[in-house]
Amino acid sequence: VTGVQTCALPISGRTQFLAYTSVDPRVWHPADPSSPRQRIRVVHAPSHKGIKGTRFVLDAVARLQAEGLAFDFELIEGVLNAEARERYLAADLIIDQLLIGWYGALAVEGMLLGKPVIAYIEDADLSRLPEQMRATIPLIRANPDSITDVLREWLTNGRPALTKRGIESRAFAERWHDPRAIAREVACHYEMALAKGHSRRGLRREL
């Protein structure tokens, strides 16, 4: 970044929120939606079952299947990253976590693949996001108490609703989780800080 400029996201106070930069949208692409399966497929891929609230996910799935709701579910664990990615691509809905209070790398990967993602988001943390980001966040919010109802709602809404949320998710991840865009933003703020420092030193010399 060259020249003094106004950064895309101004710093609030002394801090600036930076989103995950672990996945490149130029490498992760949505699947071809032209031939959807008849049954909706839900996946959950916990890095740690206890932290991610996996038992609540499994309980919700068992309850809904007992109700007679027809859908496929897969618990993804113990596979290589490349294989896991292919299984995410085959999903219609991804459950990230129900306990942490924020979304993780799986959610970003799922959004870039054009998938709706369920996650528990703390209101207090949500309030710290830039206003533009907070207004467009597409994550489907759920916690251990609500996951059964939330999952039921999205399984019965039909595939068009899932597809629409998946498109919104991809757009959000492209906008807010692009490593190159975030690097440019960080460089912009560094340059502005340096420019202010030079200006202040020059003012002190004049005085």
Image (tube, grey):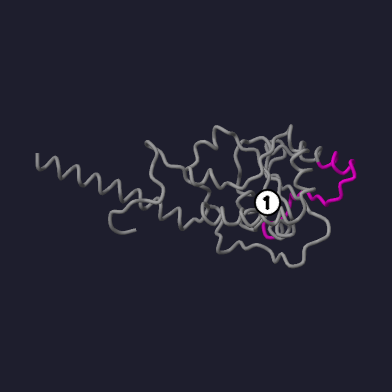
The question of residue 178 being in magenta is answered with no
Q: Is residue 122 left or right of residue 162?
A: left
Which stretch did the figure color magenta? 61-82
Packing grade of label 1 (10 A; few <14, some 14-19, many >=20) is many
> Could you tell me residue 10's position as x and y percent?
38, 45
Mark 1, secondary structure of its residue = loop
Q: What residue is shown with label 1?
A: 116
Q: Residue at x 74, y 32 (%)?
A: 145
Q: Nearer the viewer, residue 202 or 132?
A: 132
Residue 25 position within the rendered picture, expressed as x and y whole percent measured from the top left: 56, 60
Q: Is residue 119 above or below residue 8?
A: above
Amino acid at pointer 1: Pro
Percent x, y for residue 75?
A: 77, 48
- Is residue 36 rendered to the left or right of residue 124? right
**Split into 4 quadrants, where in the image is the C terminus?**
top left
- 122 with respect to 48 (left or right): left
